[in-house]
């Protein structure tokens, strides 16, 4: 067991005392990923060396590799866990899922020993990890990261959702603004899908020149208002520090976008802002948002920059996050204080390699052809071979 | 040292370890919060709103508990009927179901498409992300405390008093109101306080049915997750001190009942 296990145990106990039976988003068992991945896994049976090592490992020590990942990666990472552990039986992958901002805060504010951080927004890593020093080592929490995957924002709904029959890619902001329609949004203070949902609404009103969409959807929904400030070349959404929906609001907030799925399935939501990969993994109905609004198109990257979401934190953190609209890029890094950096690098290499790509693809999650590395020279060598420096053609 | 005192020393050490285990986390949490941050927390409008919602919803749950749980407690203490053991089992079920599972079950019934959800919707009462939803979740997990305490209390009242009242011409209602209930009252009140306290501390079932408006345990969780230990701590202290106060009350009532 790692030398950090007493710390983890104490932290867990304190957390349990503080929060009762609350906990992170639970991942399904590795086998519970989409069934389509089974052929991917079965095409590569473990070699003789691997199975003998597996026998060995089952009776001896396994390295616990702690991976904190965005909730939208639950399905592919659960499948990845099974495939990775089959190839590396000496490693016990321990994934934990949260909203993307939460993923990073577990490393930087709760000081948990984490081996791999994977967020739905790569820009969070330089903002919240590179700029912050670990008080124990005096070094930044991370000094490199890879942009490895993309996605597109879309609307998830089901057949019984109100006005589903009349929903189109053009009128969706108008339909969602109706007071009897329940709309689910991830909390933008904790999850990238949350501030991206605000961005999508602003981009929709810019595309259609219907400048009341944002106000129609969010006016009087929160105890402290979320505001939109329009300038010539920039629309700024400001999220208050205390974000709570009013009683009877038609907007429903949850800590992470993945937590909205169950409410959609139970019929308590009509629509939810989700990533396309997640919607397809769950077999829900989907409205594709136009490229100008889905934050997933390379061609519209410049347009996305016309919107910004500011989080108005004052009390609890020194960083005041501002998110400028850009194409969705998932980021991954190994924190500088990771207990098992070698194994962490093996895991990332596995994710970026053919097996990892096949699993991501089977889970409808698009990856970049070649991941872009920020801080390329500080990457582990095996990851340098799988990426190229950011800013190079 | 005689053999008995050896046993006492060993048991004393074991008990001391247990007390340390129970008290240390609470004491350390309380004492590592500065008075300033605690004072700020007491004036934080979000915290105050959260406390108001939590206390009111727990109170609503207790009112529902009294209206339904006290009659059930009386019946199970005083009458014998077929299926009584099954009723006991159902009442105690919320004690063993993981509360997140209870939340899921409640969402299935009280959600927008659930049976009760649809029943109450025409009256303008909905349960997802509302105080009503919070109260429902609190009632579900807290009712066993009230029903069990109430049953104990009614069982301890000598039925001779009731029979005497009936023989003297009182109606069954009068006998219940003026003879049985007053004697069982301290026990029922303890049950009400326990149920209220259980409701106030509930997280798992509440968070699934109603993340908003945030009850105090949800606020503690959100601040812990979102803003770190330092942000969660003062609110947690408030919750711990509140719980201590309730237990002092429960104990006082219990002592009074014992001294009767």
Image: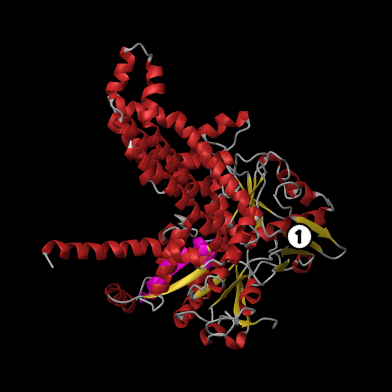
What kind of colouring is applied to the model shown?
A: secondary structure
Above or below: residue B41 compared with residue B131 = below
Q: Name the residue at the left extreme.
A: B3
From the viewer's side, name the closer residue of A189 and B160.
B160
Q: Quadrant of the C terminus of chain B?
A: top left
Q: Quadrant of residue B162?
A: top left
Residue B41 coordinates in the image, percent (x, y): 61, 59
> Is A45 left, or right, of A369 in this rendering?
left
Residue A177 appears in the figure: yes
Magenta range is A69-97
> Is A19 left, or right, of A159 in this rendering?
left
The residue that mark 1 highlights is A237
Chain of residue at mark 1: A
> Is A6 left, or right, of B132 in this rendering?
left
Residue B248 coordinates in the image, percent (x, y): 43, 49
Residue A310 coordinates in the image, percent (x, y): 73, 64
């Amino acid at each position: 067991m790692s030398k950090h296990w007493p710390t983890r145990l104490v932290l867990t106990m304190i957390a349990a005392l503080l929060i009762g039976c609350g906990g992170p988003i639970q991942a399904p068992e590795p086998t519970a990923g989409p069934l389509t991945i089974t052929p991917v896994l079965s095409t590569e049976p473990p070699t003789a060396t691997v199975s003998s090592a597996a026998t060995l490992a089952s009776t001896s020590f396994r390295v616990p590799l702690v991976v904190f990942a965005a909730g939208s990666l639950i399905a592919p990472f659960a499948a990845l866990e099974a495939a990775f552990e089959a190839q590396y039986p000496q490693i016990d992958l321990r994934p934990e899922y949260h909203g993307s901002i939460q993923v990073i805060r577990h490393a930087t504010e709760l000081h948990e020993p984490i081996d791999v951080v994977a967020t739905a927004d790569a820009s969070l890593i330089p903002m919240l990890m590179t700029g912050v020093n670990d008080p124990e080592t005096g070094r930044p929490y991370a000094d490199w990261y890879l942009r490895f995957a993309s996605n597109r924002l879309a609307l998830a709904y089901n057949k019984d959702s109100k006005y589903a029959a009349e929903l189109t890619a053009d009128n969706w902001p108008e339909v969602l603004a109706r007071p009897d329609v329940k709309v689910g949004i991830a909390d933008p203070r904790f999850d990238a899908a949350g501030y991206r949902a605000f961005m999508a609404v602003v981009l929709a009103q810019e595309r259609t020149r219907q400048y009341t969409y944002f106000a129609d959807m969010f006016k009087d929904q929160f105890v402290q208002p979320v505001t939109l400030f329009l300038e010539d070349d920039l629309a700024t959404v400001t999220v208050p520090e205390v974000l709570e929906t009013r009683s009877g609001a038609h907007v429903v907030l949850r800590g992470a976008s993945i937590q909205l799925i169950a409410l959609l399935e139970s019929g308590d939501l009509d629509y939810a802002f989700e990533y396309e990969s997640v919607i397809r993994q769950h077999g829900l109905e989907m409205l594709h948002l136009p490229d100008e609004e889905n934050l997933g198109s390379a061609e519209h990257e410049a347009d996305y920059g016309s919107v910004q979401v500011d989080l108005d934190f004052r009390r609890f953190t020194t960083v005041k996050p501002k998110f400028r609209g850009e194409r969705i890029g998932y980021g991954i890094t190994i924190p500088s204080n990771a207990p098992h950096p070698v194994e962490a690098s093996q895991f990332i290499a596995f994710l970026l390699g053919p097996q990892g790509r096949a699993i991501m693809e089977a889970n409808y999650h698009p990856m970049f052809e070649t991941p872009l590395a920020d801080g390329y020279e500080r990457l582990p060598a095996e990851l340098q071979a799988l990426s190229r420096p950011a800013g190079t053609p | 040292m005689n053999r008995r005192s050896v046993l006492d020393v060993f048991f004393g050490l074991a008990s001391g370890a247990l007390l340390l285990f129970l008290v240390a986390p609470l004491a350390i949490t309380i004492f590592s919060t500065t008075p300033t941050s605690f004072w700020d927390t007491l004036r934080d409008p979000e915290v105050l709103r959260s406390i108001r919602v939590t206390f009111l919803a727990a109170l609503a749950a207790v009112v529902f508990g009294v209206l339904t749980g006290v009659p059930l407690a009386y019946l199970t203490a005083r009458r014998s009927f077929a299926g009584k053991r099954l009723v006991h089992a159902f009442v105690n079920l919320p004690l063993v179901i993981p509360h997140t599972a209870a939340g899921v079950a409640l969402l299935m019934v009280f959600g927008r498409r659930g049976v009760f959800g649809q029943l109450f919707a025409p009256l303008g009462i909905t349960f997802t992300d509302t105080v009503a939803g919070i109260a429902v979740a609190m009632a579900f997990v807290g009712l066993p405390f009230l029903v069990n305490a109430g049953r104990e209390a009614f069982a301890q009242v000598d039925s001779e008093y009731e029979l005497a009242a009936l023989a003297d011409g009182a109606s069954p209602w009068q006998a219940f109101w003026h003879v049985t209930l007053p004697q069982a009252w301290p026990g029922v009140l303890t049950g009400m306080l326990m149920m209220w306290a259980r409701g106030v501390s509930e997280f798992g079932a509440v968070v699934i049915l109603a993340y908003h408006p945030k009850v105090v345990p949800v606020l503690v969780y959100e601040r812990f997750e979102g803003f770190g230990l330092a942000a969660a701590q003062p609110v947690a202290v408030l919750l711990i001190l509140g719980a201590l106060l309730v237990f002092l009350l429960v104990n006082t009532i219990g002592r009074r009942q014992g001294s009767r």
